[in-house]
Amino acid sequence: MALVLASAITATASAQADVLLLDAISTAPANSESGVLRPRSGASMTQVQEKFGPPTTVMDAVGEPPITRWVYPGYTVYFEYQNVINVVVHR
């Protein structure tokens, strides 16, 4: 009985996490002057720094391939090697 209950709770939590993720994606502000202007995927570190200035915080690279985080007011930029792979808007 306990195993069935634990499985049901896990499935429910997983489904709720999926919904929250989809909600977060669909409600992300536009990448424009009217939303939150931020780097696009594929941009180099040099291009990001030239367009958006220096980050407020640079997190050391971790893992293989190396993933580096640059924190700006309003969003965090994730790099694989030297290129943007994702940008997450702070909430």
Image (tube, rainbow, N blue to C red):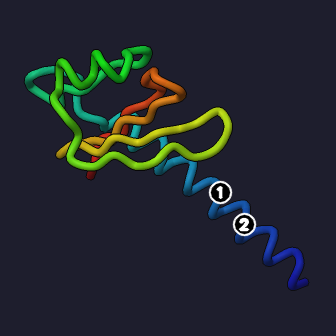
What residue is rendered at 23% in x and 40% in y? 55
- As drawn, is 84 to the left or to the right of 6? left
Q: Nearer the viewer, residue 17 or 70?
A: 70
Checking the image for residue 22, the label placed there is none
Amino acid, disc 2: Thr
**Residue 50 locus on image (x, y percent):** 19, 19
Dividing the picture into quarters, in which one does residue 13 lie? bottom right
What residue is rendered at 17% in x and 26% in y? 52
Amino acid, disc 1: Ser
What residue is rendered at 80% in x and 77% in y? 5
**Residue 23 locus on image (x, y percent):** 41, 43
Judged from the image, the secondary structure of the residue bearing numbered disc 1 is helix
Q: Is residue 29 above or below residue 60?
A: above
**Residue 70 locus on image (x, y percent):** 34, 41
List the residue tagged with mark 2.
Answer: 10
Checking the image for residue 14, the label placed there is 1
- Is the residue marked by circle 2 packed among few (<14), some (14-19), or many (20+) residues within 10 Å? few
Judged from the image, the secondary structure of the residue bearing numbered disc 2 is helix
**Residue 79 locus on image (x, y percent):** 46, 31
- As drawn, is 4 to the left or to the right of 67? right
Q: Is residue 68 above or below residue 90?
A: above
